[in-house]
Image (cartoon, rainbow, N blue to C red):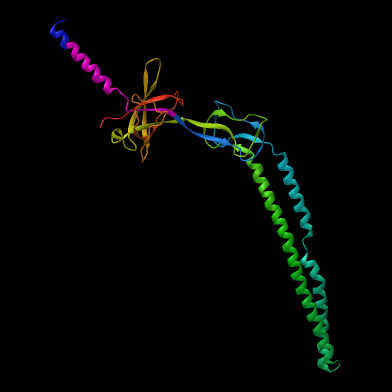
């Protein structure tokens, strides 16, 4: 090999090494999706399930219906008790009508007697007796009003208590119908038709596969090169040895460092302090949660 050929080969080796260093990713991560564990708020048997793995479901769609037979019977019993108590409310106007008529009769009689007393044909003692009778009737009216007011308050308190219990049962019945919280795709089922679920038990996992992100961890030196809102390039596997670029944007940077998580795969495995960074991807499409990704930061 001539000296000129040796020099050419040495330059090519240096160029390849330089290209290799420049093509090394700044960070590694795993693609993930925003997910929700959709759970039942009540205990019961699943009688209708409109969620299947891989099915895209719109927000507000009824996906799970639990059996409400026992709650329906409980609600009917409470409504029957309310209907039974309503007739027991005292009829104030009817019960006081007798006393009002009695008072009216005494007042008319007193008016006539007062005329006779003024003309001297009747004694004032008779007039005093009528006044005493009128005062007695007024006392009876006042006592009757107070008694019926207490009776009405007691019955109404019972009715309001039953109505509150009925409202609670209606709310529980409504909670037996589980509606999809967001637009997304069912990625995993935890319960099936005819199975019993407990309150808070997840029925299925909902993921937003249209808006994916990558969690990555950067060391302190690399962190100085990024800021919120920066555009980055993410590369994912596309075939046997090819990588497909996807644009992304940094939406989160941790304020404190942490030890390297075990699930972060880097070429350098030494223990170091890193910062959590989240990158929202501009597209979903063929990308799926769990795919490894390489992050390339913009040169600064």
Say which of 76 and 253 sits in front.
253
Compared with 88, 20 (above or below) is above
Quadrant the C terminus occupies: top left
Residue 268 position, x and y percent, is: 33, 25
Residue at position x 77%, y 73% in the image = 143
The residue sitting at the left extreme is 3
The residue sitting at the front extreme is 271
Residue 122 position, x and y percent, is: 86, 91
Residue 158 position, x and y percent, is: 72, 57
Compared with 136, 66 (above or below) is above
Quadrant the N terminus occupies: top left
Q: Choose top left, top right, bottom left or bottom right for residue 66.
A: top right
Residue 61 position, x and y percent, is: 58, 35
Magenta span: 8-31
Q: Choose top left, top right, bottom left or bottom right for residue 226.
A: top left
The residue sitting at the right extreme is 121
Q: Choose top left, top right, bottom left or bottom right for residue 250.
A: top left
Taken as a whole, is the magenta stretch helix, strand or loop?
Answer: helix
Say which of 126 and 232 sits in front.
232
- Residue 293 shown in magenta: no
The residue sitting at the bottom extreme is 120
Residue at position x 69%, y 52% in the image = 163
- Residue 11 shown in magenta: yes
Say which of 106 and 171 sits in front.
171
How many numbered marks have been drawn onto this rendered protein structure?
Answer: 0
């Amino acid at each position: 090999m001539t000296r000129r050929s040796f020099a050419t080969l040495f330059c090519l080796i240096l160029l390849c090494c330089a290209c290799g260093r420049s093509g090394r990713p700044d960070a590694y991560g795993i693609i993930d999706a925003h997910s929700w564990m959709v759970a039942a708020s009540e205990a019961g048997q699943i009688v209708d399930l409109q969620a299947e793995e891989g099915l895209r479901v719109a927000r507000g769609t009824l996906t799970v219906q639990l059996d409400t037979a026992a709650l329906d019977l409980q609600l009917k019993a409470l409504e029957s008790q309310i209907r039974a108590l309503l007739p027991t409310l005292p009829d104030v106007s009817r019960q006081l009508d007798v006393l009002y008529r009695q008072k009216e009769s005494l007042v008319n009689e007193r008016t006539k007697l007062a005329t006779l007393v003024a003309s001297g044909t009747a004694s004032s003692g008779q007039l005093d007796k009528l006044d005493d009778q009128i005062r007695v009737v007024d006392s009876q009216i006042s006592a009757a009003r107070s008694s019926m007011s207490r009776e009405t308050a007691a019955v109404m308190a019972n009715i309001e208590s039953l109505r509150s219990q009925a409202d609670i049962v209606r709310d529980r019945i409504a909670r037996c119908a589980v509606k999809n919280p967001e637009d997304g795709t069912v990625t995993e089922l935890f319960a099936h038709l005819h199975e019993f679920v407990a309150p808070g038990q997840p029925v299925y996992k909902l993921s937003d596969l249209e808006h994916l992100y990558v969690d990555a961890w950067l060391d302190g030196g690399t962190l100085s090169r990024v800021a919120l809102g920066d555009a980055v390039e993410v590369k994912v596997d596309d075939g046997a040895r090819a990588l497909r670029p996807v644009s992304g944007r940094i939406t989160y940077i941790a304020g404190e460092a942490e030890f390297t998580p075990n699930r972060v795969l880097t070429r350098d495995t030494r223990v170091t302090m890193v910062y959590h960074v989240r990158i929202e991807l501009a597209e979903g499409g063929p990308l799926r949660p769990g795919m490894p990704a390489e992050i390339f930061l913009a040169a600064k």
